[in-house]
Image (tube, rainbow, N blue to C red):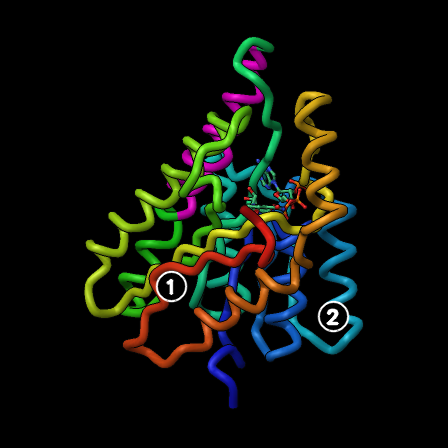
Amino acid sequence: MSGVEGKVVAITGASSGIGAATATHLAERGARLVLGARREDRLHAVVDQITAGGGSAVGTVIDVTRREDLKRLTDVAVDRFGRLDVLVSNAGTMAVSPFDELRQDDWDAMVATHITGLLNGIGAALPVFRRQRSGQFVNIASTAAYVVKSPQAVYAATKTAVKVLTEGLRQESGPHLRVTLVSPGFTNTEGVGKGASPEAAAAAARQRDEIAIPPSAIASAIGYAIEQPVGVDISEVVVRPTVQA
Ligand code: NDP
């Protein structure tokens, strides 16, 4: 029996990319999944693919910027499966642009999705984990949390916040909770360059075509952190293409 089998795992941003790949990876190893994202059709396509393959998954439409939606995600886990073992906070947006373009809505969206969204997940899952006296947070940051490259400053700042919040949470977690930060480098997903300024989108598309690793590589790292025995905490993992600077 693998360390993933039977675990109840909620994943935000599960309708595509790394979230969807993680759902598939964990379902193949016997996890029971509660998947959340905004695009209902894409979310249910992931759920249907998993259930058609004999896996266990339910989907619920959520916007991570809304506190009540994260509460609903964790409630679904407890109502349907009786518990929640892991929350993967993965939802994100990479709409990067130079400051001079003044894309303030995009700045707000990155702050709301990565910082408020993460805090909403902590607010919803922490009481469940404390009650159970077990649980694991897996938070998705980025290599941008380690090095700032123009024009990614806002994105990098919010991902640095994810890193800082994760470390603070780890320090307060006590003996029953595990807290993991996973930071991907260039990964081949539809989110790369989406909503970015034309120049940044073109650069991102080039990187994606030339060096990106598949989302399954990030899913494997997340699975590795989850499958560890109780008492072993994989605190921080960076997964990047070998050739990424
Ligand atoms: P995708 O665009 O494929 O995935 C992003 C996911 O987040 C989608 O499922 C999207 O679904 C969801 N999402 C976005 N905003 C919200 C919201 N407000 N509420 C709920 N769900 C939301 O890109 P990736 O898979 O690449 O991105 C996943 C994570 O990995 C992000 O946090 C990203 O920053 C991070 N990352 C990605 C890298 C890469 O190179 N691909 C590199 C470093 C980090 P929907 O639109 O249906 O809501």
Using the image, tell me which numbered label, if any, was put on residue 9: none
Residue 137 occupies which quadrant of the picture? bottom left
- Pick the residue in front: 192 or 77: 192
120 inside magenta stretch: yes
Q: Are marks 2 and 1 in contact (CB under 8 Å)?
A: no
Q: Residue at x 50, y 31 (%)?
A: 149
Q: Give the answer, above or below, for where 36 lies relative to 57.
A: above
Image coordinates for residue 192, horizontal then vertical, percent = 68, 39
Specify few, some or many for label 2: CA neighbours under 10 Å numbering under 14, 14-19, or 20 or more. some
Q: Residue at x 58, y 58 (%)?
A: 242
Under mark 2, the amino acid is Thr
**Which secondary structure lies at badge 1?**
strand
Residue numbers of the magenta segment: 102-121
Using the image, tell me which numbered label, if any, was put on residue 51: 2
The answer as to whether callout 2 falls within 8 Å of ligand 1 is no
Q: Is residue 190 left or right of residue 106?
A: right
Specify few, some or many for label 1: CA neighbours under 10 Å numbering under 14, 14-19, or 20 or more. many
Q: Residue at x 40, y 77 (%)?
A: 228
Q: Is residue 233 left or right of residue 148?
A: left
**Which secondary structure lies at badge 2?**
helix
Q: Is residue 7 left or right of residue 202?
A: left
The chief SS type of the magenta part is: helix
Q: Give the answer, above or below, for where 35 lies relative to 158.
A: below
Q: Residue at x 25, y 69 (%)?
A: 176
Q: Residue furthest bottom?
A: 1
Where on the image, by quarter, is ligand 1? top right
Q: Which residue is mark 1?
A: 136
